[in-house]
């Protein structure tokens, strides 16, 4: 049980909305929509909008929701592991330092999924960072021979990159591949995230799930 001296912390409505919205969108595209379908893309853009809102909120939201409240810091994460080992319970107004690393990892993973998804889906430009090797490949294709040994090139080693992008089909393959790998990585991160939530709840007794649920916003 939470200590009486510390009032239950509640996340603000935007953090709650974006969290559960992202959960619904991820589950929707993982289990409900058909891969690459109109609905999949539509849900994908919804996911992108929710993530964008959350990231904006990281600059302008209340103190606990800001990036400055949970910097990605391996040294703090190590210190936090030390606290766990010693059985110390230290209250954190925002995500604990291990949780913070998980949050950034999930966001990064979602970013890759969104960027590759949009690049495959069509018009709006993808995140330039995530799309970089896409452009590199395109640039290499310019000088590529027109006649196709694509199938062989595709099976071939890393040196065959230039031929791979011919007619843009190799690019699509690569995007699909990255999309899929990032999706699988996301599933792993989600499993760890849920394990972390359960572990933290057992260890700490603090109602971290309650803090993320709708209703009753009390200030900590
Ligand atoms: C977490 C959310 C998402 C999940 C779980 C997910 C999952 C998947 C999976 C498993 C595939 C099949 C990949 C394959 O063919 O091997 C796929 C394909 C695809 N996804 Fe997503 N996706 C997500 C988000 C997005 C987003 C944000 C977009 C774009 C707005 C998008 C657009 C596409 C497209 C266009 C394809 C077709 C690829 C092809 O040509 O085969 N996805 N997605
Ligand atoms: C698709 C599945 C999920 C994803 C991608 C996901 C992702 C995230 C992310 C990105 C955050 C950081 C929130 C922010 O600062 O905006 C977070 C926090 C949190 N999530 Fe999830 N989540 C998922 C499922 C769940 C589920 C099912 C639960 C409930 C059991 C849950 C409970 C929590 C809690 C309690 C926090 C706050 C942890 C803290 O106090 O530091 N999540 N999640």
Image (cartoon, helix red, strand yellow):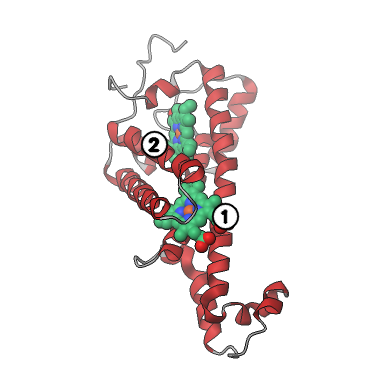
Depth order, front residue of 118/139 = 118
Left or right of residue 114, residue 167 in this image: right
Figure check: 211 above or below 66 = above
Depth order, front residue of 24/196 = 24
Q: Are marks 2 and 1 in contact (CB under 8 Å)?
A: no
Asked if residue 113 shows in the view, the reply is no
The residue at label 2 has a CB less than 8 Å from ligand 2: yes
Figure check: 195 above or below 102 = above
The residue identified by callout 2 is 19
Residue 60 position within the rendered picture, expressed as x and y whole percent measured from the top left = 26, 44
Instruction: Identify the element where label 1 is drawn.
Output: helix
The quarter holding residue 124 reads bottom left
Figure check: 210 above or below 114 = above
Residue 184 position within the rendered picture, expressed as x and y whole percent measured from the top left = 59, 48
* Quadrant of the rendered image holding ligand 2: top left
The residue at label 1 has a CB less than 8 Å from ligand 1: yes
Residue in the picture at 65% in, 80% down: 150
Asked if residue 145 shows in the view, the reply is yes
Figure check: 57 above or below 128 = above
**Looking at the rendering, in which quadrant would you find the C terminus?**
top left
Left or right of residue 195, residue 205 in this image: left
Residue 59 position within the rendered picture, expressed as x and y whole percent measured from the top left = 30, 46
Label 2 or label 1, whichever comes before in sequence order: 2
Q: CA distance from mark 2 to mark 1?
A: 22 Å
Depth order, front residue of 220/218 = 218
Residue in the picture at 47% in, 67% down: 131
The residue identified by callout 1 is 180
Query: Crowdedness of circle 1 by 10 Å Cα count: few (<14), some, many (20+)?
Result: some
Instruction: Identify the element where label 2 is drawn.
Output: helix
Residue 146 position within the rendered picture, expressed as x and y whole percent measured from the top left = 58, 90
Query: Crowdedness of circle 2 by 10 Å Cα count: few (<14), some, many (20+)?
Result: some
């Amino acid at each position: 049980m939470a200590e009486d001296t510390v009032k239950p912390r509640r996340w603000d409505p935007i953090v709650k909305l974006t969290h559960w919205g992202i959960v619904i969108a991820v589950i929707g595209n993982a289990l409900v929509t058909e891969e690459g379908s109109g609905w999949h893309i539509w849900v994908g853009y919804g996911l992108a909008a929710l993530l964008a809102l959350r990231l904006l909120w990281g600059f302008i939201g209340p103190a606990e929701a800001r990036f400055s409240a949970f910097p990605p810091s391996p040294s703090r994460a190590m210190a936090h592991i030390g606290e766990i080992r010693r059985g110390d319970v230290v209250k954190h107004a925002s995500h604990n330092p291990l949780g913070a690393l998980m949050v950034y990892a999930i966001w990064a993973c979602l970013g890759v999924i969104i960027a590759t998804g949009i690049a495959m889906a069509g018009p709006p430009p993808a995140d330039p960072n995530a799309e970089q090797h896409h452009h590199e490949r395109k640039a290499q294709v310019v000088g590529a021979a027109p006649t196709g040994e694509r199938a062989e090139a595709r099976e071939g080693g890393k040196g065959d990159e230039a031929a791979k992008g011919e007619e843009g089909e190799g690019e699509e393959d690569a995007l699909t591949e990255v999309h899929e790998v990032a999706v699988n990585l996301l599933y792993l991160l989600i499993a760890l995230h849920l394990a972390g939530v359960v572990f933290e709840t057992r260890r700490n007794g603090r109602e971290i799930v309650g803090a993320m649920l709708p209703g009753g916003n009390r200030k900590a």
